[in-house]
Image: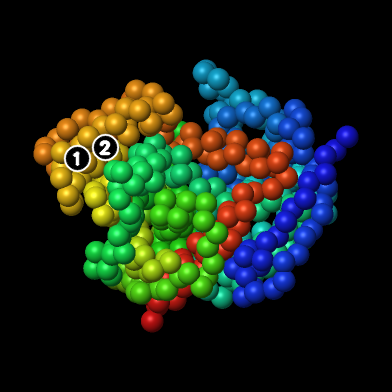
Amino acid sequence: MKKLAIIIVTGVFLAACTGGNKQTQTETKNMFTGAKGEVKIMTLDPGHFHAALVQKSMYEQVDSTVYVYAPEGDDLKEHLARINSYNSRAENPTHWNEVVYTGPDFFEKMIAEKPGNVMVTAGNNAIKTDYILKTVEAGINVLADKPMVITPEEFPKLEKAFLVAAEKGVLLYDIMTERYEITTILQRELSQKPQVFGTLQTGTPEEPAITKESVHHFSKMVSGNPLKRPAWFFDTKQQGEGIVDVNTHLVDLIQWEAFPEVVLSKADVEIVSGKRWTTDLTPEMFKKVTSLDQYPEYLQKDVVDGTLKVYSNGEIVYKLKGIYAKASVIWNFEAPEGGGDTHYSIMRGTNCNLVIKQGAEQGYKPTLYVEAVAGSPAELEANLTKTVNEELQAAYPGIKLVKQSDKLWMVEIPASYSVGHEAHFTQVTEKYLQYLKDGKLPEWEVPNMIVKYYITTEGLKAALK
């Protein structure tokens, strides 16, 4: 027998969505029990490699047949090639069976046929918000790659999608892989230990209490192969500007770390400033990552003297519940030798700063430091040592504290915890499958997703002024 689940849409959630309505309850049937193969995936227009990474592993709860609805073209070919590489690899091969429909009415066909109960979308963002809304209106669960919306004008549509999802009893969730990165997890853990961290400072616009900075690269390796990017990836009308794309992860982490499991609302947000700038690509660079000899017509608007100027970089400074925060993203063409995408983060506490660095000095591996800022370094060291040895090691065996100087310590983390970006997609998917079985998301997830996309889209609005 199928279990009944009560999905409660709290007044706080509705306030985040609509500005305040009475609390309501929606009683729905939970269609999932955790049984083998009960989750049936439909992949919609997989233009981004993240769509394939969801299928890099098998899941007992997921049927091995996946229904793909997409237009003909290189995006689809690249996606199917990645799935085939997972199926044919020597170690732990997958056994996905891809059933593909490629007519021009691919989206309408998916909604009409509905052979699955979960839609996965990772690709062109120009009409992704429309797809998400119409999919939940059809009573289909959605696991979406970020970003779910790329403009302030489309943001109300995303708010509506969350309301409809609640009414239909389906789960709409985005893929936040960075919550599974071990140094970020430990930074969050230590920030919740007042004997070590104290409390989060208020900060200033010039020196925010929490800062997240991310550096990415257009030319990179994925699943052991050079990544071929679609030309539309460089069109901000289709991909979105950097300030609303990768910044989604950073804004999410700021909320997740500074206000863990706290229900947030748009009223908690004040945008202080936003800015944007371009990464310039020569025709040779563009060809290296797309295999195209020339820029398509839709990119000509961004070409100046033969150079493609992509607004892939952005920064938002804002206040969240009175705390100053900064999220910024930079796209370079390719990483230095031995390097890759990098992350910098700082949480400023009244006792110490928790800092993640990933530069050349760290061998381009994320490394967590604890930096004394007030009081007695000896007292902090004693509290920090006790917390790591008696509390954190119980949950994360093998980690240890390494003293760098009188006021600086490094948290040494066994390599086994650093599973890599691609493996995080499996972890997110497993979490989503558990939510499907539970019949609900944690109460803070939906309102906080809404706040997250409100910050990114309002940040873009500020940057465009």
- Front position in the image: 99 or 444: 444
The color scheme shown is: rainbow
Give SS at disc 2.
helix
How packed is label 1: few (under 14 Cα within 10 Å), some, or many (20 or more)? Answer: few
Q: Position of residue 239 (x, y in %)?
A: 49, 61
Which residue does the numbered mark 2 point to in the structure image?
383
Which residue does the numbered mark 1 point to in the structure image?
379
Q: Position of residue 104 (x, y in %)?
A: 72, 57
The single residue placed furthest to the bottom in the displayed view is: 465
Relative side of 400 to 174, left or right: left
Give SS at disc 1.
helix
Q: Position of residue 233 (x, y in %)?
A: 47, 57
- Front position in the image: 75 or 443: 443
Relative side of 76 to 171, left or right: left
Q: Position of residue 51 (x, y in %)?
A: 57, 44
Q: Report the amino acid beneath label 2.
A: Asn
What residue lies at 19% left-to-right and 46% top-to-bottom? 372
- Front position in the image: 141 or 279: 141
- Of the numbered discs in the image, which one, if any, rests on residue 203? none
- Front position in the image: 124 or 22: 22
Q: Quadrant of the N terminus?
A: top right
The single residue placed furthest to the top in the displayed view is: 90
Q: Quadrant of residue 387?
A: top left
Q: Report the amino acid beneath label 1.
A: Glu
What residue lies at 39% left-to-right and 41% top-to-bottom? 189
Relative side of 417 to 29, left or right: left
Q: Quadrant of the C terminus?
A: bottom left
Q: Are marks 1 and 2 in contact (CB under 8 Å)?
A: yes
